[in-house]
Amino acid sequence: MKGTSSMKDGATIDRRTLLAGTAALSVALMLPGGRARATEQGKAVHGLSVFGDLKYPPGFEAFDYVGRDAPKGGRFVFSAPSWGFNQNPQTFNTFNTFILKGDAPPRMELCFDTLMVRALDEPDAMYGLVAESVEISDDGNTYVFNIRPEARFHDDSPLTAEDVAFSLTTLKEMGHPSIRQALSEMVSAGALDTARVAVHFSGRQARKAPLTVAGMPILSKAYYTRYDFAQSTLTPPLSSGPYKVGRHEVGRFVEYERVKTWWAADLPVSRGMFNFDVIRLEFFRDRQVDFEAFKKGVTTYREEFTARTWATEYNFPAVEDGRVTREEIPDGRPAGAQGWFLNTRRPMFQDPRIRQAIGFVFDFEWSNQALFYGAYTRTQSFFQNSPMLAQGEPTPEEMVLLERFRSQIPAAAFGPAVMAPVSDGSGQDRTMLREADRLLREAGCTRDGSTLLLPGGQPLTFEMLSNTTAFERVALPFVKNLARLGITANYRVVDPAQYQSRINDYDYDMVGRRFALSATLGEEIRDLLSSSAATTPGSGNLAGISDPVVDALIDIALNAPTRNEMEIAARALDRVLRAGYYWVPQWYKPVHTVATWDAFDRVAEPPAYDFAPEAQWWYDSARAKAAGVE
């Protein structure tokens, strides 16, 4: 691993070694190797999935998790969440969400159609939206999407194969780095005629790559002939989805208006979806101001992320009289990785022992009881709350993979999965602080009075970058404990624009972030963990992980022929990552803590693999009137 004493710097792994690892794993599991088929090849099919399993047959009427006859109307108002490429939860200054430049408002994806859409009650299956069907070549490297003739942009111009080919080509060449990474193995996209577009892959693509392409937004070629795709702009773009940009005020709010003439409203993948006439996002820079707005009914939906608020502050009149309801909705998705990421591009963090020592200083047990009211569980894994989480000793199948790289990965990866230290809950556990001190001395650090010096003689001083004061109550006790070891850490809050710019340029020492992965790994994991992403501005690889073993295990996971083999490879990867101490893991909870003004209805059982109430719930005008938020 980059800059560590336990790794060989500059080591490489060729493709023969990678393929040998995949083959060995298949033999160990007595399963076939080779490329899995997403669906039956050689004919047009209505859906795709990575491992060939589809819940919904041709001609299905609607997804099970929607209200098929849900009424249209009303408003869904909430504070802006962080979601998607180039989106900022605190402000916006562009509507171009597909490039690195600028901050776009969340939920711009509501404005754009895609070739296919996910079924949220399946791990990765997709069914046709703009594409009525898809044909797959025998070698799995060419996908031909058949475009519905009724597809239209909002100006009533036809959406054709030319628009699809233009979109995929433009996004690969000029899109956000995360999009370019996702499309890296797409060789070309071309229109065969107005209704058929062929997408060609390199043969090295991950199994999920065709689904990634099918989920990319479709742009109007004619529109972007007149407008520069590479520029940020506050001119709402021409699009074709269920919503379009409506009223907006920069930094304050944006409204998405339902397109009542949307061409796809009655398709099986759309029936019962997108029911609100207006979805409005309010922007707040302060969580307490955000909460006060909800209490007054300015916003009508709130997912609460502050445990103290959930435990102690939902006692205002609207809760007491039943106009506001609270519930905990199960979250079946992988919880992903939430933590403070240490930027290993910085020389002071290149020794894993120093990184491990810093992890010993954070007292989660004290924080959970004193600050979080016991609401959270400690995050341990990059794949928390999923079958990809490594536990205990490696299984024989995991060892098949790990053994191939024994000389290149830490010994800790071969033992019980690395776990975050458990404190005595005092807030300053002396045993943990002594262990941290031991690791620092082992790494060559020394003391000059009350100051800890790195092996080169410089004081160990770093900055914890944030865009909110909400984490101060968690970070400051952490900072205080670091000072006990002679480490100077500063919690620095900057404005949203500066924060995003510094993240894009990797101009930070330590930063807190949460990444959620899907139940089926795709190219997005390269954006978070790969060596190529470590040097790509704007990628999700905040820690700067640059390790050929990580790259190889990612390749094995993405090319696994079965879900079981993918999960085994992911667990081996998880062991290597956790043994690298790239982060100080934080916490998670397997539920959505949700409060709403009593104005909405929904199906009883939400889908397991995503949570998007603004797209799936509907408005009850009588209840909204009774609650006073009509």
Image (spheres, helix red, strand yellow):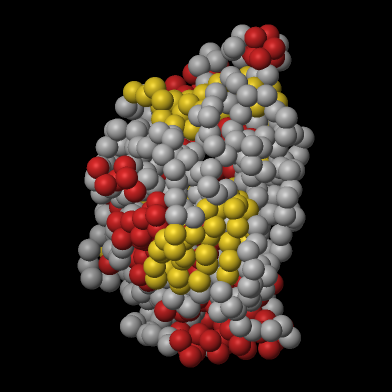
Q: Nearer the viewer, residue 118 or 81?
A: 118
**Residue 215 as seen in the image, left or right of residue 54:** left
**Which residue lies at the image location 37% right of the left edge and 24% below the top edge?**
248
Q: With respect to residue 229, does 323 lie above or below?
A: above
Question: What residue is drawn where x is 49% and y is 33%?
Answer: 243
Measuring from the top left, give residue 83's x and y in whole percent. Answer: 47, 43
Closest to the observer: 91 or 95?
95
Residue 526 in view here? no
The correct choice, above or below, for 243 with respect to 481 in the image is: above
Kindly tell me whether residue 564 is visible in this rendering. Answer: yes
Q: Give percent across and percent down for residue 212.
A: 51, 59
Q: Which quadrant holds the C terminus?
A: top right
438 or 78, which lies in front? Answer: 78
Q: Position of residue 55 (x, y in %)?
A: 74, 56
Residue at image location 30% in from the left, 33% down from the top: 235
Image side of residue 151 versus residue 396, left or right: left
Q: How many marks do you count on the picture? A: 0
Give above or below for 325 relative to 407.
above
Residue drawn at 23 percent across, 70 percent down: 456
Residue 629 image position (x, y, % from top left): 59, 12
Kindly indicate the quadrant of the structure image that contains residue 41.
bottom right
Q: Quadrant of residue 245?
A: top left
Residue at the far front in the pictured view: 193
Toward the right, the furthest residue is 604
Of 444 and 527, the residue lying toward us: 527
Quadrant assignment for the N terminus = bottom left
